[in-house]
Image (cartoon, coloured by chain):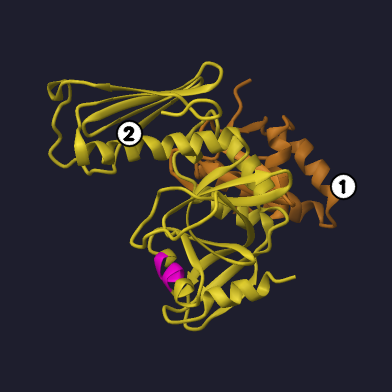
Amino acid sequence: VGGGDGVDTLVFQVDARDFRELERARPYSFDLDYRPASVHLAGPLFMARLDWAPGLRGALWTSAVDAAFQGVFENYFRVLVAYRLLERGGALVHSAAVRDEGGACLAFGPSGAGKTTFARRAREAGATVLSDDLNPLCADDRTALVASAPFHGELENGPAPPVVPLRAIGRLRKAESDSLQPLPLGDCVASLTACAPFVSRDPHRAARLLENLESLARGVPAFELHFTRSGRAFELLRAASEP
Amino acid sequence: VTSSSPAFRARPDVRFRVVDGKGVLIRQEAGEVVVLNPVGARVLDLLQSGAVLQRVLERLAEEFEVGAAELERDVLQFVRELVDAGVLEEEAR
């Protein structure tokens, strides 16, 4: 998988008896072991590792086939994308991102904050959903970008170019009425960090994550976005970020 | 915690960065991210640079317009809270 500017991954099919069955294993639950030059993953029907030697490369061992393999590979791929972004100045963030002709708006918050609701309302208002689950953030020179990726939650991702300039960030908060107020950079970076899976718990690389998120968020208008389920949160965020 | 205490340092699972004056603090084992106000961020930043508590108080007195007694009371309480929360530990000497 990959090559050139990509990341090489070796995939090994192994015997199912090499894995022990767990009674309450959940498909998207797995353990990570963070080491100075590698990250190890272990979950239902698979184990994997990322190595910096010194460039990033990966290996995956699994007994899963067909649909089960897709689930296993997505588990691995999410972690790989998070670390690939990290080493290139970016970050993977649990969030909803939508785009229109003016760029992308990113809404984020903890589980249940309303990411899918935000994306659905934005789509009804004419925007295209990039993802209502996980979005890669990266930078080109000094411009923060949202990159397209195959991750999605309840909503299917719409068509998108490889990257879209990030025009606004909104931290979601359910409220009785729609409104927004500026979000200080420090609060924005802290909240984005809390929504960055895998890397924020990595003792060897979390400092780089903070650095990347500060660099990405600086210069992008950020807001505390109070929103209702039927409201106009996207329109407010879009209007607030217009030059 | 008293002002004559030796230095404190962040525990191994803590990552910290000052962003536009505020402190962004990750407690990795707890999976928490905390924002510190500018004074709290400055305290932790000074402690992380190796300053002992007495030196932290001296620096803050120079940088902020606040009475010495109030400053010492507030900083000691803040450091105590960070120790209790598992953010800081007293540095062995």
Q: Are marks 2 and 1 on the same chain?
A: no
Magenta stretch in the rendered image = A116-120
Q: Quadrant of the N terminus of chain A?
A: top left
Instruction: Work out how far the residue at label 2 is from the one at label 1, CA to CA, in angstroms.
Output: 47 Å
Seen in the picture, residue A143 relative to B10 is either above or below; the reply is below
- Residue B28 x %, y %: 48, 39
Q: Colour of chain B?
A: orange
- Residue A85 x %, y %: 55, 38
Which residue shows up at 55% across the image and 55% down it?
A191
- Residue type at the position of mark 1: Glu
Q: For this rendering, which residue is in front, A105 or A3? A: A3
SS type, badge 2? strand
Q: Residues within 10 Å of mark 1 (few under 14, many from 20)?
A: few
The chain to which mark 2 is attached is A
The chain to which mark 1 is attached is B
Question: Quick check: can you spot residue B1?
Answer: no
SS type, badge 1? helix
Which residue shows up at 74% across the image and 52% down it?
B20
Q: Is residue A30 left or right of residue A100?
A: left
- Residue type at the position of mark 2: Asp
- Residue B13 x %, y %: 51, 34
Seen in the picture, residue A102 relative to B41 is either above or below; the reply is below
Q: Is residue A119 magenta?
A: yes
Q: For this rendering, which residue is in front, B71 or A59? A: A59
Q: Is residue A90 magenta?
A: no
Q: Main secondary structure of the magenta part?
A: helix
Seen in the picture, residue B53 relative to A103 is either above or below; the reply is above
Which residue shows up at 44% across the image and 61% down it?
A158
Question: Where does label 2 land, which residue?
Answer: A31
Question: Where does label 1 land, which residue?
Answer: B62
Q: For this rendering, which residue is in front, A180 or A15? A: A15
